[in-house]
Amino acid sequence: GAGLVEVAFKVNGERRKLSIDPRVTLLDALRERLQLTGTKKGCDRGQCGACTVHVDDRRVLSCLTLAATLQGKEVTTIEGIADGDELHPVQRAFIDHDGFQCGFCTSGQIMSAVKIVEEPAVRTDDQIREAMSGNICRCGAYPNILEAIKQAKGGER
Ligand code: FES
Protein backbone atom coordinates (compact mmCIF):
# COMPACT_ATOMS: atom_id res chain seq x y z
CA GLY A 1 0.00 0.00 0.00
CA ALA A 2 0.89 3.65 -0.15
CA GLY A 3 3.75 4.68 2.06
CA LEU A 4 4.70 1.17 3.08
CA VAL A 5 8.21 -0.20 2.79
CA GLU A 6 9.36 -3.78 2.41
CA VAL A 7 11.91 -5.07 4.86
CA ALA A 8 13.36 -8.56 5.18
CA PHE A 9 15.33 -9.67 8.21
CA LYS A 10 15.87 -12.72 10.37
CA VAL A 11 14.15 -13.09 13.69
CA ASN A 12 15.40 -15.90 15.93
CA GLY A 13 16.92 -17.56 12.88
CA GLU A 14 13.81 -17.37 10.71
CA ARG A 15 13.51 -15.18 7.63
CA ARG A 16 10.68 -12.67 7.98
CA LYS A 17 9.43 -10.18 5.44
CA LEU A 18 7.20 -7.27 6.37
CA SER A 19 5.44 -4.52 4.53
CA ILE A 20 5.44 -1.74 7.07
CA ASP A 21 5.04 1.93 7.71
CA PRO A 22 8.61 3.30 7.91
CA ARG A 23 7.79 4.82 11.31
CA VAL A 24 7.01 1.47 12.96
CA THR A 25 9.43 0.52 15.70
CA LEU A 26 11.05 -2.88 15.94
CA LEU A 27 9.19 -3.27 19.25
CA ASP A 28 5.78 -2.85 17.64
CA ALA A 29 6.77 -4.99 14.66
CA LEU A 30 7.81 -7.82 16.98
CA ARG A 31 4.75 -7.62 19.21
CA GLU A 32 2.01 -6.72 16.75
CA ARG A 33 3.17 -8.15 13.45
CA LEU A 34 5.22 -11.15 14.49
CA GLN A 35 3.32 -12.05 17.70
CA LEU A 36 6.57 -12.13 19.68
CA THR A 37 5.18 -10.62 22.85
CA GLY A 38 8.00 -11.67 25.17
CA THR A 39 9.63 -8.32 24.42
CA LYS A 40 7.86 -5.79 26.64
CA LYS A 41 6.83 -2.20 26.13
CA GLY A 42 7.57 -0.22 29.25
CA CYS A 43 8.27 3.46 28.60
CA ASP A 44 8.40 3.29 24.76
CA ARG A 45 11.03 6.05 24.82
CA GLY A 46 14.38 4.53 25.62
CA GLN A 47 14.39 4.87 29.38
CA CYS A 48 13.54 1.49 30.92
CA GLY A 49 15.24 -1.32 28.96
CA ALA A 50 12.16 -3.58 29.00
CA CYS A 51 12.27 -3.77 25.20
CA THR A 52 15.93 -4.88 24.90
CA VAL A 53 16.69 -7.31 22.07
CA HIS A 54 19.81 -8.18 20.08
CA VAL A 55 20.47 -6.95 16.55
CA ASP A 56 23.49 -8.65 14.98
CA ASP A 57 24.77 -9.51 18.46
CA ARG A 58 24.47 -6.04 19.96
CA ARG A 59 21.96 -4.98 22.59
CA VAL A 60 19.44 -2.49 21.25
CA LEU A 61 16.33 -0.83 22.60
CA SER A 62 13.67 -2.02 20.18
CA CYS A 63 11.42 0.96 21.02
CA LEU A 64 14.07 3.30 19.58
CA THR A 65 14.86 1.19 16.51
CA LEU A 66 12.84 1.53 13.34
CA ALA A 67 12.02 -1.86 11.86
CA ALA A 68 12.58 -0.49 8.35
CA THR A 69 16.29 0.02 9.12
CA LEU A 70 16.87 -3.69 9.71
CA GLN A 71 17.08 -4.96 6.15
CA GLY A 72 19.35 -8.03 6.18
CA LYS A 73 19.96 -7.91 9.93
CA GLU A 74 19.55 -10.68 12.50
CA VAL A 75 17.27 -9.99 15.42
CA THR A 76 17.20 -12.17 18.52
CA THR A 77 14.47 -11.90 21.13
CA ILE A 78 13.84 -13.63 24.44
CA GLU A 79 11.93 -16.31 22.52
CA GLY A 80 15.12 -17.20 20.63
CA ILE A 81 17.79 -17.69 23.29
CA ALA A 82 16.87 -21.10 24.75
CA ASP A 83 18.26 -24.16 23.01
CA GLY A 84 15.09 -26.19 22.44
CA ASP A 85 13.89 -27.24 25.91
CA GLU A 86 17.22 -26.25 27.44
CA LEU A 87 17.11 -22.78 29.01
CA HIS A 88 19.91 -20.36 28.25
CA PRO A 89 22.35 -20.32 31.22
CA VAL A 90 21.28 -16.73 31.96
CA GLN A 91 17.61 -17.77 32.10
CA ARG A 92 18.49 -20.58 34.49
CA ALA A 93 20.55 -18.22 36.64
CA PHE A 94 17.65 -15.76 36.92
CA ILE A 95 15.44 -18.61 38.15
CA ASP A 96 18.09 -19.90 40.57
CA HIS A 97 18.53 -16.44 42.11
CA ASP A 98 14.93 -15.17 41.95
CA GLY A 99 16.07 -12.45 39.56
CA PHE A 100 12.52 -11.19 39.04
CA GLN A 101 9.38 -10.33 40.96
CA CYS A 102 6.54 -9.08 38.77
CA GLY A 103 8.46 -10.23 35.68
CA PHE A 104 7.67 -7.27 33.48
CA CYS A 105 11.28 -6.14 33.04
CA THR A 106 12.68 -9.68 32.99
CA SER A 107 13.02 -10.39 29.29
CA GLY A 108 14.85 -7.09 28.81
CA GLN A 109 17.04 -7.78 31.85
CA ILE A 110 17.91 -11.22 30.48
CA MET A 111 18.63 -9.98 26.95
CA SER A 112 20.93 -7.34 28.40
CA ALA A 113 22.54 -9.80 30.79
CA VAL A 114 23.30 -12.29 27.99
CA LYS A 115 25.59 -9.68 26.39
CA ILE A 116 27.14 -8.68 29.73
CA VAL A 117 27.96 -12.30 30.46
CA GLU A 118 29.75 -12.52 27.09
CA GLU A 119 31.69 -9.29 27.74
CA PRO A 120 35.05 -10.09 29.37
CA ALA A 121 35.75 -6.43 30.23
CA VAL A 122 32.77 -6.40 32.59
CA ARG A 123 33.93 -8.25 35.70
CA THR A 124 33.34 -6.52 39.03
CA ASP A 125 29.99 -5.99 40.73
CA ASP A 126 30.22 -2.27 39.95
CA GLN A 127 31.00 -2.92 36.30
CA ILE A 128 28.04 -5.29 36.05
CA ARG A 129 25.73 -2.75 37.74
CA GLU A 130 26.94 -0.02 35.40
CA ALA A 131 26.52 -2.22 32.31
CA MET A 132 22.99 -3.12 33.44
CA SER A 133 22.02 0.41 34.43
CA GLY A 134 19.79 0.87 31.38
CA ASN A 135 17.47 -1.88 32.62
CA ILE A 136 15.12 -0.58 35.28
CA CYS A 137 13.39 -2.95 37.72
CA ARG A 138 10.52 -1.32 39.56
CA CYS A 139 10.40 -4.17 42.06
CA GLY A 140 14.03 -3.58 43.03
CA ALA A 141 15.27 -7.09 42.31
CA TYR A 142 18.73 -5.68 41.53
CA PRO A 143 20.71 -7.69 44.14
CA ASN A 144 19.24 -10.95 42.82
CA ILE A 145 19.81 -9.92 39.21
CA LEU A 146 23.46 -9.19 40.06
CA GLU A 147 23.85 -12.62 41.67
CA ALA A 148 22.24 -14.26 38.64
CA ILE A 149 24.65 -12.54 36.26
CA LYS A 150 27.61 -13.50 38.42
CA GLN A 151 26.48 -17.13 38.37
CA ALA A 152 26.09 -17.07 34.59
CA LYS A 153 29.50 -15.44 34.19
CA GLY A 154 31.14 -17.98 36.44
CA GLY A 155 29.55 -20.77 34.47
CA GLU A 156 28.25 -22.27 37.73
CA ARG A 157 25.03 -24.18 37.73
FE1 FES B 1 12.08 0.70 25.26
FE2 FES B 1 11.39 1.43 27.75
S1 FES B 1 10.18 0.38 26.24
S2 FES B 1 13.37 1.52 26.81
Image (spheres, rainbow, N blue to C red):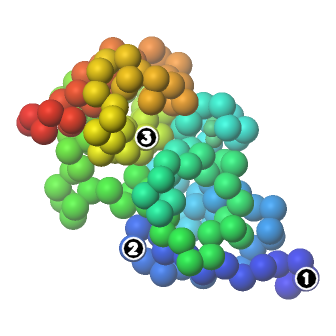
Residue 64 placement (x, y as % from top left): 69, 48
Measured as percent of width and height from the top left, residue 18 is found at 65, 78
The answer to whether one can see residue 9 in this image is: yes
**Which kind of residue does numbered mark 3 sit on?**
Ser
Q: Give the residue at x 40% y 52%.
A: 78
Q: Residue at x 18, y 59 (%)?
A: 85
State which image quarter holds ligand 1: top right
In which quadrant will I find the C terminus? top left
Which circle, 1 or 2, is nearer the viewer?
2
Q: Reading the chain from its start, which is encountered first: label 1 or label 2? A: 1
Quarter assignment of residue 118: top left
SS at circle 1: loop
Q: Assess disc 1: are there few (<14), some (14-19) or many (≥20) residues with their C-alpha within 10 Å of its C-alpha.
A: few
Ligand 1 has an atom within 8 Å of the beta carbon of the residue at disc 2 = no
3 and 1 marks in contact (CB < 8 Å) = no
Residue 9 coordinates in the image, percent (x, y)? 55, 76
- Mark pair 3, 1: CA separation: 37 Å
Q: How many marks?
A: 3
How dense is the environment of label 2, judged by Cα within 10 Å: few (below 14), some, or many (20 and up)?
few
Q: Is residue 105 above or below residue 55?
A: above
Find numbered disc 3 in the image and state the secondary structure of the residue it sits on.
helix
The label on residue 112 is 3
State whether residue 110 is above or below residue 103. below
Q: Amino acid at mark 2?
A: Gly
Could you tell whether 57 is left or right of 72 in the image?
Answer: left
Q: Earlier in the sequence, mark 3 or mark 1?
A: 1
- Residue with the mark numbered 1: 2
Left or right side of 5 for 98: left
Q: CA distance from mark 1 to mark 2?
A: 30 Å
Rendered image quadrant of residue 67:
bottom right
Q: Which residue is mark 2?
A: 13
